[in-house]
Amino acid sequence: MKITAVKVYVTGRKPAANAPEAVAGAGGSAVAKKGSWLSETVIANPMSMYPEYFDRRSSWTGMGGRTIVALETDEGLVGIGETASGMATSPIIKQHLSRFLVGQSPFQVERLWDVMFKVTLPYGRKGAPIMAISAVDLALWDLIAKARREPLYRTLGGPVKEKVPAYCTGNEFEKTKDRGFLGQKLAMPYGPSSGYEGMRKNVELVARAREALGPEKEVMLDCYMAWNVDYTVRMAELVAPYRVKWIEESLPPDDYEGYGIINRKVNSSAIATGEHEYTRYGFQQLLDARAADILQPDVCWCGGITEARKISAMASAKHIPVIPHAGGLQPWALHLIFADPNMPMAEFAYINGADLPNQDPVLAGVPAPKDGWFELPQGVGAGIEFRPDADDHLIELEG
Ligand SMILES: [Mg+2]
């Protein structure tokens, strides 16, 4: 089997002027659209110190939309992959990576990954170029599993479990508390720029969540790179009575040493991070710094399944579990979770609010949890396909 074409699309409403509409969102390859709590509510973030960007992350995020890759083959099979920051990642695939894919066998996934990584080294290593490689890698794995006529988790050596528990991210715990999730991860609204009053409001939110969820559910805190070492240690002390399972991404991703410090100082909660880390080289730095008890690579960003497996193998040698960022929102990641003994649970979120089911306008077959659990995904490959009217939401890049 040979790859015959690399189709690259950015999501957005088709405009008259042929310029893709950037969709504001806080990242995540999942379906965030204008109006999502993810982009439109107060969530502490690296820009919170600038008053004009405090209220919503959509005031500063850019290069939005999703990149969708379709690898076509001479056998008629099509592999589908995806990443975020579509306006930045899609041209990398179309203008550069596609040259090394057309005419190649998708089964040589290790070779293709290595080639894509090395040809992007002059401008790559982290961020958009690795996200672009991730989308291609996921499409390759989808193709390999489709060619073997089996679900992707089987191609990856699984399943190692029949069901995967999900936790829910967001602050609508009053609405989601009875839906069977193992716990709720709160998006912390405030950081150091909001002073002690913000700290007190953060603690009140955690207290309300613990009260609503009862003693047996887990409560986690997501801090989106917004805090610092001192603030994290003080917050950990203040929320300790509410039994917080983990404090996530509280420092900027480059503060490896800081993560090592908070991981040593904070004993009442686990420290989790890695959502904005890339490749085994980045995760090696986190492991070397003993930066976290839980690592959270995003399979659609960190280098795809090929790299996520290596990251998980490295973490497993230190007995550190991997809980992929947005793993229950990304079909490829969910298959990997089912196949990897070191991935114990999946993140889920109601992207458009807890009253609405997630609706992907482009891809059909994206799994949803039932009573807080994911069951083994159905279908061959990653189990997804383009919806019949997907074209209305996709802008194809020209060669
Ligand atoms: Mg997070």
Image: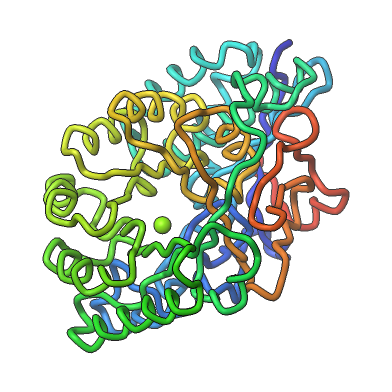
Residue sitting at 75 percent across and 52 percent down?
A: 362
Q: Quadrant of the N terminus?
A: top right
- Give residue 85's position: percent from left, percent from top: 50, 52
Instruction: Using the image, determine if residue 15 lies above or below residue 194.
Output: above
Q: Nearer the viewer, residue 29 or 248?
A: 248
Quadrant of ligand 1 in image: bottom left
- Give residue 301's position: percent from left, percent from top: 46, 41
Instruction: Using the image, determine if residue 97 lies above or below residue 105.
Output: below
Left or right: 276, with 137 as reference point: left
Q: Nearer the viewer, residue 293 or 75?
A: 293
- Give residue 287's position: percent from left, percent from top: 23, 34
| Quarter occupied by residue 396 | top right
User: In the rendered picture of this protein, how many numbered marks are placed on residues?
Assistant: 0
Residue sitting at 45 percent across and 64 percent down?
A: 185
Q: Quadrant of the C terminus?
A: top right
Q: Nearer the viewer, residue 247 or 192?
A: 247
Residue sitting at 63 percent across and 12 percent down?
A: 107
Name of the residue lying farthest toward the front = 215
Left or right: 87, with 254 as reference point: right
Name of the residue lying farthest toward the right = 388
Left or right: 141, with 252 as reference point: right
Instruction: Using the image, determine if residue 67 lies above or below residue 269.
Output: above
Describe the colour scheme in one phrase. rainbow
- Give residue 77's position: percent from left, percent from top: 80, 23
Residue sitting at 54 percent across and 35 percent down?
A: 93
